[in-house]
Amino acid sequence: MTKKLLLLVVLFIFFISLTTLFFIFNYLDPYRNEVVSIVTLTLSFVLCVTSFISMILYIFKKVYYRGEIFLVHIFSSLRQGFLISMFIVWIVIFKIIGVFSIATIWLFILILIFIEMIFQNF
């Protein structure tokens, strides 16, 4: 797989998930089936944010490494984008269940940093 093909797939995922997120917000009735609406909304949000942040991180890495980007950098951008989107989702979940505080946010950030460090060592 080449870099351009992978970036094209990520861009395609971004546009499809953004369109799906728009349609879910406008046309899905959350009162008919709450579980389906929460799962589809969360999944499309995670895909949209992951692909968008991975493209932004790819641009930053391309500037930082002066254009010398490999496939590994794109995969690490995808992984980091996924961790950031999961952070956003879990912050909302913490707010819903009532354990939202600065301490829980910092502990969750620390956990995600350690998970990222574990994956970087593989």
Image (cartoon, grey):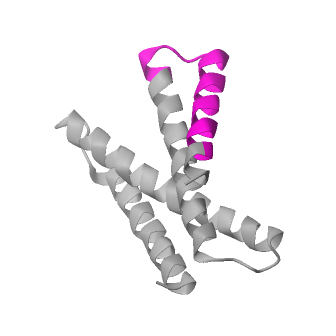
User: In the picture shown, does residue 98 fall above or below 80?
Assistant: above
Question: What residue span does the magenta drawing correspond to?
Answer: 95-117
Q: Quadrant of residue 88?
A: top right
Residue 24 within the magenta-colored segment of the rendering? no
User: In the picture shown, does residue 77 fall above or below 96?
Assistant: below
Residue 107 within the magenta-colored segment of the rendering? yes
Residue 32 in picture, x, y percent from top left: 16, 37
In this orientation, which residue lies closer to the viewer: 26 or 115? 115
User: In the picture shown, does residue 36 fall above or below 101?
Assistant: below
In this orientation, which residue lies closer to the viewer: 121 or 43? 121
Residue 119 in picture, x, y percent from top left: 55, 50
Picture residue at 64% right of the left edge, 30% below the top? 110
**Which residue, as the protein is rendered here, is positioned at the far left?**
32
Residue 87 in picture, x, y percent from top left: 54, 38
Q: Is residue 33 left or right of residue 13?
A: left
Which quadrant of the rendered structure holds the C terminus? Answer: bottom right
Magenta stretch: dominant secondary structure: helix
Q: Is residue 26 left or right of residue 35?
A: right
Q: Quadrant of residue 66?
A: bottom right
Q: Quadrant of residue 112?
A: top right
Picture residue at 80% right of the left edge, 72% below the top? 65
